[in-house]
Image: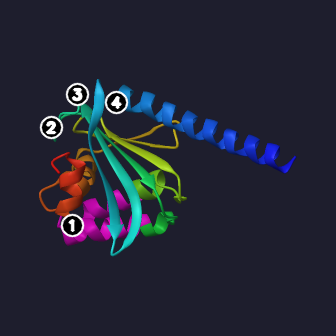
Amino acid sequence: MVKCTLGALVAFFLIVANGFAAAQTVMIETFVPEAALVGEARFKVLLFPVYDASLYAPNGEFEKSGPLALVLNYVSDLKKERIVNTTVKTFERRQMGSPANIEKWRKIMAKHFSDVKKGDRIMIAFPDLQRVVFSTNGSQPTFVSDEGFAAAFKDLWLGDNVRNKGFQTKLLGLK
């Protein structure tokens, strides 16, 4: 009886996980025509893994100005406040915007971000230069129309002044 119940539970979770992945694939293709994988990398802070990232672009060919999607598969639990504060500190440290813009972006992130649990999949799409689209676990997407935020947020992973060039190189499929 226990084996049967455990087997049914595992099957349920696989179906749910595959459902999230399928919904996310459809969403990626909605925002990135002919999306294909560019590269993958694991992001760590010190020795602690945070998420596995996958970058998608049309036909798998990266162009910073073109439509792109990042999928972050979290391997750690993180509170929304920590994600927002860390991102704000990164914007400030890299001088990615004026103090007024960064404060405006803090409010955007506070509205669109949520706590993250191990196993959550977050899609971040950049369909054009003005918008960012967020979806967690295949949920209904939310949109941010702010060209400055879109550029700064994309530059966190794909800009010239990134924290971890090795991570970026793998994400761009160059290694």
Left or right: 120 as drawn, with respect to 66: right
Q: Amino acid at mark 4?
A: Phe
**Viewer-side label of 3, 1:** 3
Q: Position of residue 139 (x, y in %)?
A: 54, 38
> Which amino acid type is shown beneath numbered disc 1?
Arg
Tell me where residue 12 appears, x and y as whole percent.
69, 39
Structural distance between the alpha carbons of marks 4 and 2:
15 Å
**10 Å crowding of disc 1: few (<14), some (14-19), many (20+):** few
Which residue is label 4 attached to?
31
Q: Which residues are magenta?
A: 83-107
Residue situated in front as seen by the camera: 77 or 124? 77
Q: Tell me which residue sits at (37%, 61%) in the image.
A: 106
Q: Are marks 2 and 1 in contact (CB under 8 Å)?
A: no
Spatial CA span between label 2 and label 1: 20 Å
Camera-side mark, 3 or 2: 3
Marks 1 and 4, how far apart at CA: 27 Å
State which mark lies toward you, 3 or 4: 3
The residue singled out by tag 3 in the image is: 59
Sequence-wise, the earlier of marks 3 and 1 is 3
